[in-house]
Amino acid sequence: MRLWKNLLMALAMSVFAASVAEAADPKDPKDVKIGFVVKQPEEPWFQDEWKFADIAAKEKGFTLIKIGAEDGEKALSAIDNLGAQGAQGVIICTPDVKLGPGLVARAKANQLKLMTVDDQLVNSKGKALEDVPHMGISATKIGEAVGQAIVDQIKARGWNVKDVGAIRVSYDQLPTAKDRVEGAISVLKQNGFLAQNIFDAPQSKTDTEASLNAATVVLNKNPNIKKWVAFGLNDEAVLGAVRATEAVGLKGTDVVGVGIGGSDAAINEFKKPSPTGFYGSVIISPKRHGYETTLNMFNWVLANKPPEKLTLTSGKLATRDTYVAVRKDLGLQ
Ligand code: GLA
């Protein structure tokens, strides 16, 4: 009797294990389902990431499920939702990197392979979760490229660096944001920029409006400074600062803003008939972050080939004169 019971139990367990293994390990591309969750679905950068992820899905014949998750609760329920739909993997740019351990646990509970893009997860001590495969930009280097572009323009315009103010649009709770602005500042300082002329403009959210509000405070507090440079996490941050300089009556020739991204937000600015204070953008690759991450996840799900633990992508400065060529170079046409 007992033996039978044990045998039945073993049989039931192996059937269960097989179905779990099957769910987690599809053999055919058409059975693969991958989620792509982003924190700010309305931002052109994330629209582009999704666009390139869709191309990968079409090419390989798997299903891509795109979900916007603007806060932690939505991110966690997106993972559950994907689990319920039978997805096997998820790529996420989380709205809050401190959700790290929670997201990892939730993905595990739903038997989802997890990879992050753009913003790397951290634990409660702020340390990166290095076991979760991640693709992000080389934040410090790209920040340095921003700083160099600004310095070059200060020189080209014949400004005395001591008269120039810098708006540091900041979102320091996000490590990649902090690294980007610190990269820019290091180059400014190496080139004689005065530390006391660099003003922090903390944004409450990473969008243009929040940046405009933060930068307006800085400008209103320093009416005697007539030449400004601006940098931040992305194009939206810098565009907000540039709009703030326009609102206080500064001309495009008095402002050098250099963003990071190169999606529509920047391109539309370059297309304006005359130059604004938004001088340039270091174009990064939504193609790599969207197409490559999705393909990496596909290979992980189907062939059990895990992605690299860390991939850092590069960027290239573009201005209104060069953006067409730079985009072409990056395969972004
Ligand atoms: C962060 C920013 C985005 C974009 C990506 C690039 O997520 O919020 O605007 O710059 O990094 O990795």
Image (cartoon, grey):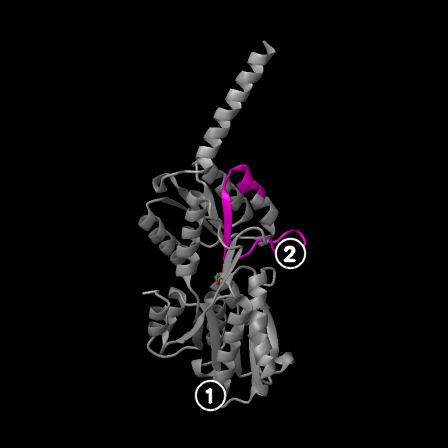
Find out whether residue 106 is within the magenta segment. yes
Question: Outermost residue, top direction?
Answer: 1
Q: Locate the C terminus by quadrant.
A: bottom left
Report whether residue 203 is seen.
no
**Upstream in the sequence, badge 1 or badge 2?**
2
Q: Is residue 124 above or below residue 172?
A: above
Report the number of numbered marks: 2
Q: On the image, numbered disc 2 is attached to which residue?
A: 127
In x, y percent, where is residue 52?
A: 37, 56
Q: On the image, numbered disc 1 is attached to which residue?
A: 156
- Disc number lying in front (1 or 2): 2
In x, y percent, where is residue 141?
A: 53, 71
Left-right relation of 189 to 240: right
Q: Residues within 10 Å of mark 1 (few under 14, many from 20)?
A: few
Left-right relation of 220 to 242: right
State yes or no: discs 1 and 2 in contact (Cβ < 8 Å). no
Report whether residue 51 is seen.
yes
In x, y percent, where is residue 46?
A: 43, 57
Q: Locate the N terminus by quadrant.
A: top right
Residues drawn in magenta: 105-129
Mark 2 lies on a secondary structure that is loop
Q: Nearer the viewer, residue 157 or 247?
A: 157
Amino acid at circle 1: Ala
Mark 1 lies on a secondary structure that is helix
Left-right relation of 167 to 44: right
Amino acid at circle 2: Lys
Mark 2 CB lies closer than 8 A to ligand 1: no
Find out whether residue 113 is within the magenta segment. yes
Residue at 39% of width from left, 60% of height from top? 287
